[in-house]
Amino acid sequence: MRVTRRRPEWRVTAIARDTYALEQKSPYAQCVDYLLVGRDRAAVIDTGLASRGALRSVVTALTDRPVDVWLTHGHADHIGHAGEFGAAYLHEADRPVQAAHSDPAFLKRLLREEMGAALAAVARPVVRRVTAIPPADYRWFGDDQVFDLGGREVTVVPVPGHTPGSVCYLDQATGGLFTGDSCCDWGVLLHLEFCLPPAVYLESARRLLGLQRAGAFRFNWPGHHGFPAAADLPEQYAACAESIADGSGVVRPRRHHAVVRYRDVLITLPRTYLAQPVGRR
């Protein structure tokens, strides 16, 4: 049974032993971060959008262990509060992503492109707030990384696609896989700057599906939308990415990008895919 405690902006839900979902709920943010507590240390997986509220105060109410940050990737809506904690660990392939998403000028341009200039102008106070990301003590790791919180080991699973350095965190003690933006309900974005081609994401989706079929995890804890995510999402995303690769998926236009749907999920693509030959996908 879930036990939920409420605090301003952040909703805290116990999802397993010594494991909490920290849901950032505001008019401009819906992000899900997670707190894992071990015998010696604790870790926050992702830290939401920058805001006036302090994530650290929510975390310290739940544990007195020293707290680090483990990031699934370097986007602004995952690194916003990283500077409130100790070391912030991020895959080395996301160095340029983190640098860009810590730059207010880059983020304001990105928001104008995604929201439209008129809406961005109306939302200017919010734009100023979410693009003011404090510096953090970033530490870089590669593909073969295991973290130990003291009696609780968590393994990094590389899943490049959404960004070059996207990763999941496999906590076998609880049967949980923390997937960031790589296996959410609704969709995976591959149209943004720094995103890799869908063929790369296809290999990542197959990796997650293989882990699931091998029994490595039972719960998919994503960075947005509902949690846990639907159990069959790895299968759906692998099939969706395969349909892009083999040309069977229908590429449809959207305002800023293209999209391919498969059952309950979608993958976004740059608009160039609307005219791209199947063999080049």
Image (tube, rainbow, N blue to C red):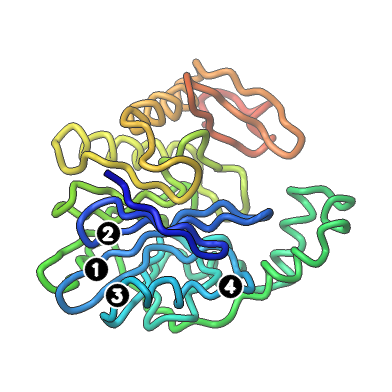
- Reply above or below: 23 against 259: below
Residue at which label 2 appears: 19
Residue at which label 3 appears: 63
Q: Give me the C-alpha separation between circle 3 and circle 4.
A: 18 Å
Residue at which label 4 appears: 53
**Reading the chain from its start, which is encountered first: label 4 or label 2?**
2
Residue at which label 1 appears: 37
Q: Is residue 216 in sight in this rendering?
A: yes
Q: What residue type is labelled 4?
A: Gly
Q: What element carries label 3?
A: loop
Residue at the (68%, 54%) spot, across then down: 27
Instruction: Say if mark 1 contacts mark 3, CB within 8 Å.
Output: yes
Q: What residue type is labelled 1?
A: Val
Q: What residue type is labelled 2?
A: Thr
Quarter residue 102 falls in = bottom right
Q: What residue type is labelled 3?
A: Thr
**Reading the chain from its start, which is encountered first: label 2 or label 3?**
2
